[in-house]
Image (cartoon, rainbow, N blue to C red):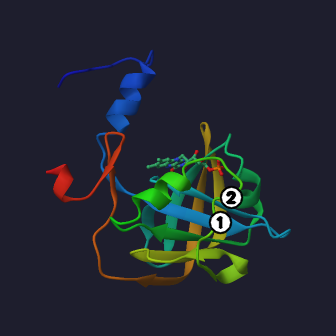
Amino acid sequence: MTDSNTNTDFDYRALRDAFGCFATGVTIITATSDAGISVGLTANSFSSVSLNPALVSWSLSSHAPSLPVFQNCSHYAIHVLCDAQQELALRFAQSRDDKFAGLELGEGLGGTPLLDGALAVFQCSNAYRHAGGDHVIFLGQVEKFEHNQGKPLIFHAGKFGDMAQQE
Ligand SMILES: Cc1cc2nc3c(=O)[nH]c(=O)nc-3n(C[C@H](O)[C@H](O)[C@H](O)COP(=O)(O)O)c2cc1C
């Protein structure tokens, strides 16, 4: 153990580093508002929750510009990225209006934009939302899903990589 914090007077840089010890996959979550505004963000807070009913969770910063759309949309789509999609992950990790520009998009449940090339896609109804500190925790009910062969994009210790690079 290098750093240890045992009280609540946290060093938040150290806390972020400790959270970053948990290696995750990377997703892009997309949705469309009633007015037709499409949003999407890179998220690694995704987790499977329950098989029956089929539920997944993820969390969104309360400060995210996309929050109002995600709070109110009927559906969203969670794309699990493959190792060739790091550039897309970087694009959707920025606040900008043209995130979808030039991409080939499908249309999912509730008009949700669907991205090509993901390892798995979960189309979810926007079932539950809970306050969680400085984030909102979303629970989605999976209505449709697909998955493909390939290697996942990995996020660990603040860096993207593939499985080989984590060894
Ligand atoms: C690997 C990675 C994982 C991320 N995971 C999350 C997440 O789970 N929740 C979140 O709110 N932001 C997360 N972010 C930050 C968002 O992608 C970023 O703030 C994005 O700009 C939000 O979209 P918006 O500005 O259009 O609302 C992550 C960023 C990266 C690079």
Which residue in the structure is indicated by mark 2?
Answer: 98
User: What percent of the width, then of the height, locates residue 166?
Assistant: 19, 50
Residue 13's label in the rendered image is none
Callout 2 environment at 10 Å: few (<14), some (14 to 19), or many (20+)? few
Residue 96 shown left or right of residue 80 in the figure: right
- Rounded to the nearest angstrom, the CA distance separating label 2 from label 1 is 5 Å
User: What percent of the width, then of the height, locates residue 92?
Assistant: 56, 55
Residue 36 shown left or right of residue 108 in the figure: right
Residue 133 shown left or right of residue 2 in the figure: right
Callout 1 environment at 10 Å: few (<14), some (14 to 19), or many (20+)? few
Q: Is mark 2 within 8 Å of ligand 1?
A: no
**Residue 96 shows in the view:** yes
User: What percent of the width, then of the height, locates residue 132?
Assistant: 59, 43
Assign a secondary structure to mark 2.
Answer: loop
Which residue in the structure is indicated by mark 1?
Answer: 101
Q: Residue at 64% x, 65% y: name it.
A: 100
Assign a secondary structure to mark 1.
Answer: loop
